[in-house]
Amino acid sequence: MEPVDTDVTGPDEHDGDAPPAGQAGDGPDGAPTLGDLLLAVEELWPESLAEGWDEVGLVAGHPASPVTKVMFAVDPTLEVIEEAVEWGAELLITHHPLLLKGVTSVAATTPKGRAVHRLIESGTALLTVHTNGDSAVGGVSDVLADALGLRDVAPLTLAANGLPEEGIGRVGDLEDAMSLGDFAARVFGILPSVAGGVRVSGDKDGLVRRIAVCGGAGDSLFNEVRASNADVYVTADLRHHPASEAREAALNGRPYLVDVSHFASEWLWLPAAAAALGNVLADQGLDVDIQVSTTNSDPWDFILTPG
């Protein structure tokens, strides 16, 4: 599986306005602590924005531990954890939870147990920013909408405990209408390369302008997408029956559907999230090196297509 290309500017590459290390933080030699990082993350992606079924926040780590290196990734897989450990990250921030469902054991005889043991034994903290990262301003779907060039963007569903700009999914308009085929090519062009590619349902020559997006699995939002009058819906993990029923319920064939990789749709957020966290920490006088994982954790390796 090919690694993902990353290009994230660390705090040490920012403008010369950032204060030097040691002016803030309670860790050894004035280093920031995990507690400092948790406060900065809460400022950007409040846990109150997480969906009720979700599990976000600190999974492993001591708030008093010093943190000088942070890595962002989509999934807390063993390969990603090893990458973080080898780089020397004291904190790994992942979009997907390691322990979304309840467990009765974290013995190292299971993959999740081995992940927990590796994190603790290496002194690497793990923090989950999941649906709070989806919902927040500048979150997963905001980044996807921006990458597609959408304007006048609004949430598909409003957050129960957030601002009017916060919620799951986004809908907005292209500056100019284009064919579904050309739009699908734009989607393909902004995403990291993965085996699944991009699947499209609809008239290739049909004109589209109003676009709904939801990073990650979004087949629970079809009612909201129809209510938004979107011409096309971009999301991931579209299953056969929801997609088939959406086509049956479509008005004049719309919304068209563009189905992408779950990993790819959410990976776009990582560089933006890393930059946002770096800016908040720099404003607080905290010097932390931040990188995005290069591990491609999309589960598929290759695909066969007709012809």
Image (cartoon, rainbow, N blue to C red):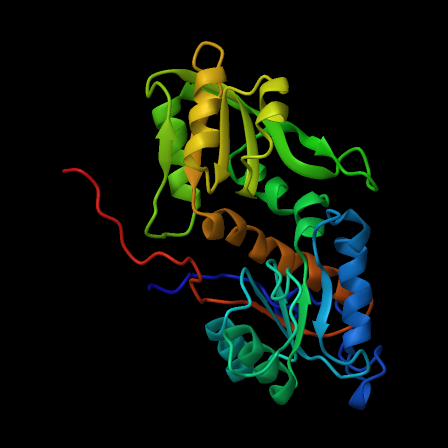
Q: Can you give x and y, in whole percent of width and height, for residue 143 in the image?
A: 59, 44
Q: As rendered, which of 107 and 293 lies closer to the eye? A: 107
Q: How many marks?
A: 0
Q: As rendered, which of 49 and 38 lies closer to the eye? A: 49
- Horizontal side of residue 22 vs 298, given as left or right: right
Residue found farthest to the front: 104
Q: Quadrant of residue 162?
A: top right
Q: Can you give x and y, in whole percent of width and height, for residue 20 in the image?
A: 76, 77
Q: Can you give x and y, in whole percent of width and height, for residue 302 in the image?
A: 27, 54
From the viewer's perspective, is residue 291 above or below residue 187? below
From the viewer's perspective, is residue 80 above or below residue 171? below
Q: Can you give x and y, in whole percent of width and height, for residue 195 in the image?
A: 32, 52
From the viewer's perspective, is residue 199 above or below residue 273? above
Q: Quadrant of residue 289?
A: bottom right
Which quadrant holds the N terminus?
Answer: bottom left
Which quadrant holds the C terminus?
Answer: top left
From the viewer's perspective, is residue 205 above or below residue 153? above
Q: In which quarter of the image is residue 37?
A: bottom right
- Horizontal side of residue 40 vs 187, given as left or right: right
- Horizontal side of residue 54 vs 306, given as left or right: right
Instruction: Identify which residue is drawn at 42% across, 57% down.
Output: 298
Residue found farthest to the left: 307
Instruction: Identify which residue is drawn at 64% across, 81% down.
Output: 124
